[in-house]
Amino acid sequence: MILLAVVAFVAVLMLVLGFEMFLVLGVPTLMIKEFFYGTMPDPVVAQKILGGINHTTLLAIPFFILAAELMGAGQIAGRLIGFVKAMLGHTRGGMGYTTIGGSMAFGSVSGSAPATVAAMARMVYPEMRRVGFNQKFSLGLIVASAETALLIPPSITFIIYAWMTGTSVTRLFVGGLAVGVVLGLAFAVLVAVEARRSGVKGGERSTWPQRLLAFRAAGWALGMPMIILGGIYTGVFTPTEAAAVSVVYAIFVEMVVYRELDWKKLFAVTERAAISTAIIFVLLAMGGLLSYFITLARVPDSIIMFLEAAHAGPIVFLLVVNVTFLVAGMFIDPNSALLILVPPLYPVAMAFGIDPVHFGMIVTLNISIGMITPPFGLDIFVASSTLSKPVTAIVAGLTPFILANIVVLGIITYIPGISTFLPNLVVG
């Protein structure tokens, strides 16, 4: 017990001192190996680090990251938002609905919340302020709406969860569509209330010919989510194949059709995507090793025995899961939270008979909340950097959206049918 306490102290100390997360994950894990499994040959550790990420499912991650970078650097994102604005911009608070719809549309082809914040912020923030939304609400809505990118498929978080648990990626994607829509509707309610409270008016109504022009202008951009999601749901593509197709399609549209990217810009975009991919895969490698030792130490069995001794059922267990993820999300990045907490908690969820897709929705929504929760919510800092706004100004507008998230989380947690109905209907 003393050694375990020392290992936990080292992990917390490294986190507080600002060490990179791969070190926060890796150093304590290697300490566990030396203290508790000293006779284990070192090549086994290397095999677990490298073999853990040698999985075809994970190939989708670099492709979707590159696709998101291509869209953000080109015109696909702007044209998607332009089409949503033409359809919704005339309603009271229409720019708020456009922000939500645009984030969901961008998320449907990127799978990345930070990329969605960066792409959306510059395009919608000036318009939201112009139509009458105050700064606090505008910043809060932009940051919170980007969460839907983790739920609306394709989602990088779902891909990592599927890799860790063996759950069908397609089933997760279908379930995430329903949960993402529920979250988007919750944000839309806040927009409606704020628009009425602040006297925000709608923009000029687009005529049907103007909407048709917006549709035609966004035609190639709209083709991307149709190809990705349609290909996955109809079985034409696996999620990994769809990710590769999305990159080829984005390069073709941005370089040949829109002519927004040249070879120099393409190289720069690819470099940024490669750096982001490397960061994620280093974390996955360390997380895979940690997961191995958690399983070896039978941590899930210990949790199950503790809950049984306390006469705690699935309701209490899911409450503990939510609280644990919410607290973790305040201090560590989403992928690290996923890698640390899912290995010990997933087997317990299965022992309680919780559907793996349902558990995946709970985990992902918790991670989404963590991305907008101070003090270390990643999307807060992305928005701050993109719009040159102080972090305090962004945090000030997030309270109603965090509360809305918690309400939706409670609904998703205890009404599993929302998460599982479509997967059972579509995928069987």
Image (cartoon, rainbow, N blue to C red):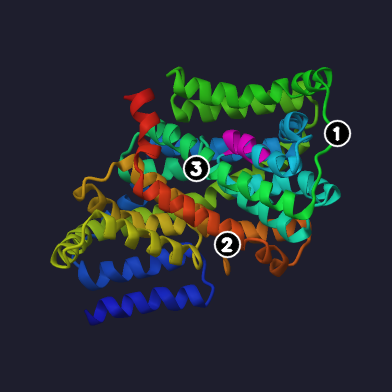
Task: Name the element at disc 1.
Answer: loop
Report the side of 17 relative to 58 (left or right): right
Q: Which residues are magenta?
A: 102-110
Kind of residue sitting beneath label 1? Glu
Observer-nearest of 11 and 211: 211
Observer-nearest of 186 and 177: 186
Report the side of 270 relative to 257 (left or right): left
- Kindly report the distance in space between the C-alpha atoms of the residues bearing marks 2 and 3: 17 Å
In magenta segment, residue 30: no
- Kindly report the distance in space between the C-alpha atoms of the residues bearing marks 1 and 3: 37 Å
In magenta segment, residue 107: yes
Residue 76 x, y percent position in the rendering: 72, 31
Residue 366 appears in the picture as rendered: yes
Neighbour class for label 1 at 10 Å: few (<14), some, many (≥20)?
A: few
Q: Which residue is mark 3?
A: 156
Residue 204 is tagged as 1
Q: Is residue 301 above or below residue 239?
A: below
Kind of residue sitting beneath label 2? Gly
Q: Is residue 339 above or below residue 116?
A: below
Q: Residue at position x 69%, y 26% from top?
A: 221
- Numbered marks: total: 3
Neighbour class for label 2 at 10 Å: few (<14), some, many (≥20)?
A: many
Q: Which residue is mark 2?
A: 377
Task: Name the element at disc 2.
Answer: loop
